[in-house]
Image: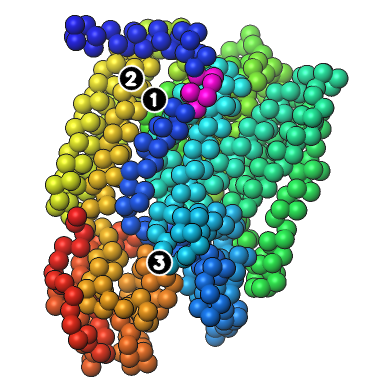
Amino acid sequence: MAASLLKEWPHRLRDLWLSPAFERFASGWPAGLLLVVLCLAVYLPGLATIPAVDRDESRFAQASRQMFESVALPEAQRDTRPFEIHESPDGTSSVTVGLHAGGLAVPAVGERPRLNKPPLIYWLQAASSALFTQGDPLRDAIWMYRVPSLLAAILAVLATWRIGASMSDPRVGLLAAAFLAVCPVVAWESHQARADHALLATTTLTMWCLWELFKRRTTPRDQRSRSLRWTGPLALATALALGILAKGPITPLIAGLTLIALCLLSRNWRWTGTLKLWLTVLVCAALVAPWVWAVGERVGHQRYLAIVLDETLGRSAGAKEGHWGPPGYHTVLSAVLFWPGSLLTLAAVTEACRRAIRLRESSATGLRRSLSLPARMRARSPETDAPLFLLCWLLPAWLVFELVSTKLPHYTLPLYPALALLTALTLHRLIREGLMPDESRKLRGGILIWSAIGLAVCLAPPIALLAHGLTTPTAIAGAAVAIAAGLVLVTGAALLAFRARPLAAHALAIGAWTIALACTLGLALPRASDLWTTRALVARLDLYAADWRAQPIGAVRYHEDSLVFASRGRLARLPDHAGPAWLDANPSAVLIAPADLDIPGAHRLTADPIRGLNYAAGRTESLHLWTNTPPQTRVGDPNANVGGE
């Protein structure tokens, strides 16, 4: 009986998928609830237990904390030193500010203003922390600053589901939303207190609004709802303005390129009148301009303009902070970052191009056929709206991201909903029509690559963590379960894909990745003691200097932002030669210094150095704690395992 069920379940799954009852299910709130449960299964494990990650997450969280403190701390405890401009001999200048002088307008990490990102994510994170701490900043924790990313990811997943339902079929939307929910780049960013998921959510909402307006372009004017004539453009303008506040020009860039491409390929510009672009300009100005003016008044309008230009044009012209990649970087990486949805992505994009843009046939052959391509392109006829819209959303912006010099894996994240929807459209067709023999042969090479990527994605993280300080039974068991689930379920998914059972193959792959991710992030990663150097430092500081949070704290060479977050922004980052003088000037302070650096006249608190991997800098750290006034008593064992349970 069990063997028969195992053999028949892919067929039964396909029959269930194609049934009218499941179509009704996919269009209603139960499907939305199912997607939320899937998201929580992927995003919650590790959310509260993974320490603050270097470097961007710690910077975002600390800037949000300082905003929160600027309105929540008693006035006597606030550091409101004014903005100061420091001119260097080489002609450059820098700005310093009190920890809380920026208020809700100017984000700052420690004494350094952080103006390269707009404020929406800081406001959301500060509000989240205020909610969970009931207004007491001293009770905050890193997970509170991650909650907005989790909620933004869920919002983007639900919006993708509704876009798919509006475009084609609610089952397409459900499948696309599931692909987006579990793909590695979305899953990891959901555990990070950063701006990327705020950008993903606002961009997806913007494109949903744009799609609804594009879809209604063929409806006669007298048949359009009067209320929708204004609510649609207003929703588009609001989502676009929030996108600007989330991450600057990215949302307008994607929406603008999509709009231009749609007009060119559909050969129809008149429908843009329904967008009421003047309303978009007014709403964006009303929501964005006050913050821009407030920042300019504090740090100088020219200085802020220079920062904005450096973050936009500067990242395009040259690789910022060493983040360079060749053209094709994002395309190759998407096979990993979009797994398990990436099996049919290339075929989906190719099919969408064929369906959306039919070129006029030519009787010419060879060179003459190639030379006639421009004329045939001018005579092309768009066939369907959905593939055309998704291609216009995906390809122009993707090309821009491939051409800019600065590249990071998450830069193309706002385009992943389009990628998921295109893939889901193709997969749904294959489920409905059956996988043709010629299609099956073409996919064999892709299935092998897809399976290898799946095994690497599921197995590599837990195996790597086993080599970096997993000593507790819980952590080892989590890594073992992740490895076992990856091996068994990904292998099963590959066999089903070879047997032309794409729906069952993707179901197993999603299950494999969900289990592996939950075990890796929830059980193994938080307990990998070698990775969390700052957590080890904090634990040792608590042992030797219980009041260190009320004293000055300095660091030589180890300047990571997770330590800034742990010290609540009070860390003094010192050059190698400045340690002794700084300790003399701050008698009650604690200094963190490399083990190879001696501090004459100071007392070393640690008998053995604190060792750990600095993954942000790519080196191993060996650190000691120093003070001018050794503690009277020691609390606990200095050699205790601070990374375990």
- Residue 490 among those drawn in magenta: no
How far apart, in angstroms, are the residues tagged by discs 3 and 1?
A: 40 Å
The location of residue 359, given as percent across then percent down, is: 64, 16
- Residue 30 among those drawn in magenta: yes
Foreground residue, 441 or 146?
146
Residue 212 figure quarter: top right
Amino acid type, residue under disc 2 in the picture = Ala
- Counting residues from the start of the chain, the first of labels 2 and 1 encountered is 1
Residue drawn at (29%, 21%), measured in percent from left and top? 493
How far apart, in angstroms, are the residues tagged by discs 2 and 3?
A: 43 Å
Residue 343 marker: 1
Amino acid type, residue under disc 3 in the picture = Phe
The location of residue 354, given as percent across then percent down, is: 57, 18
Q: Is mark 1 on a helix, strand or loop?
A: helix
The location of residue 48, given as percent across then percent down, is: 35, 51
Residue to which mark 2 is pinned: 505
Quarter of the N terminus within the rendering = top left
Check whether the beta carbons of the residues at disc 2 and disc 1 lie within 8 A of each other.
Answer: yes
